[in-house]
Image (tube, rainbow, N blue to C red):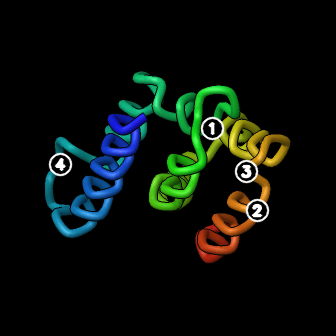
């Protein structure tokens, strides 16, 4: 669990630093999102059986990135929303409140 928490923390730092260094043409937000999809990051974060409260609490920056790049698909939205059926309902509503500015 500790490795996953460090992983999401590092991923959030990468996302924040990516905004500062946006001139890099190779490491783009789309590249990072595709990498996360290919490496099962979303399944780890949004699957109620695989995730943990501390991981869910740290998904805000990932969701903001997906929304800002128009890559928050219906499938990812359904996976994210499925967390409300588990013990994460309050956290999901809190996250939605934080990302509401990015919603269209």
Residue 52: image location, x then y, percent: 58, 41
- How far apart are the alpha carbons under marks 3 and 1? 10 Å
- The answer to whether marks 2 and 1 mark residues whose Cβ atoms lie closer than 8 Å is no
Residue 2 to residue 91: above or below: above
Residue 58 to residue 94: above or below: above
- The residue tagged 1 is 46
> Of circles 2 and 4, which is in front?
2
Q: Residue at x 22, y 62 (%)?
A: 17
- The answer to whether marks 3 and 4 mark residues whose Cβ atoms lie closer than 8 Å is no
Q: How many residues crowd mark 3 within 10 Å: few (<14), some (14–19), many (20+)?
A: some
Residue 19: image location, x then y, percent: 27, 66
- The residue tagged 4 is 25
Residue 33: image location, x then y, percent: 42, 40
- The answer to whether marks 2 and 3 mark residues whose Cβ atoms lie closer than 8 Å is yes
> Of circles 2 and 1, which is in front?
2
Q: Residue at x 34, y 52 (%)?
A: 9
Relative placement, left or right, of 43 versus 61 is right
- How far apart are the alpha carbons under marks 4 and 1? 29 Å
> Counting residues from the N terminus, which is met first, the one under dot 3 or under dot 4?
4
> Counting residues from the N terminus, which is met first, the one under dot 2 or under dot 1?
1
Secondary structure under badge 2? Answer: helix
Q: How many residues crowd mark 2 within 10 Å: few (<14), some (14–19), many (20+)?
A: few
Q: Residue at x 52, y 51 (%)?
A: 54
- How far apart are the alpha carbons under marks 2 and 1? 15 Å
Q: Residue at x 15, y 61 (%)?
A: 23
Q: How many residues crowd mark 1 within 10 Å: few (<14), some (14–19), many (20+)?
A: many
| Numbered label attached to residue 88 | 3
């Amino acid at each position: 669990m500790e490795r996953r928490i460090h992983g999401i923390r590092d991923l959030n730092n990468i996302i924040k630093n990516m905004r500062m260094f946006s001139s890099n043409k190779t490491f783009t937000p789309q590249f990072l999102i595709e990498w996360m999809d290919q490496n099962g990051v979303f399944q780890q974060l949004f699957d109620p059986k695989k995730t943990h409260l501390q991981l869910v609490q740290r998904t805000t920056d990932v969701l903001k990135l997906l929304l800002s790049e128009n890559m928050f698909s219906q499938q990812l939205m359904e996976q994210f929303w499925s967390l409300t059926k588990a013990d994460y309902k309050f956290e999901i509503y809190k996250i939605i409140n934080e990302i509401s500015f990015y919603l269209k």
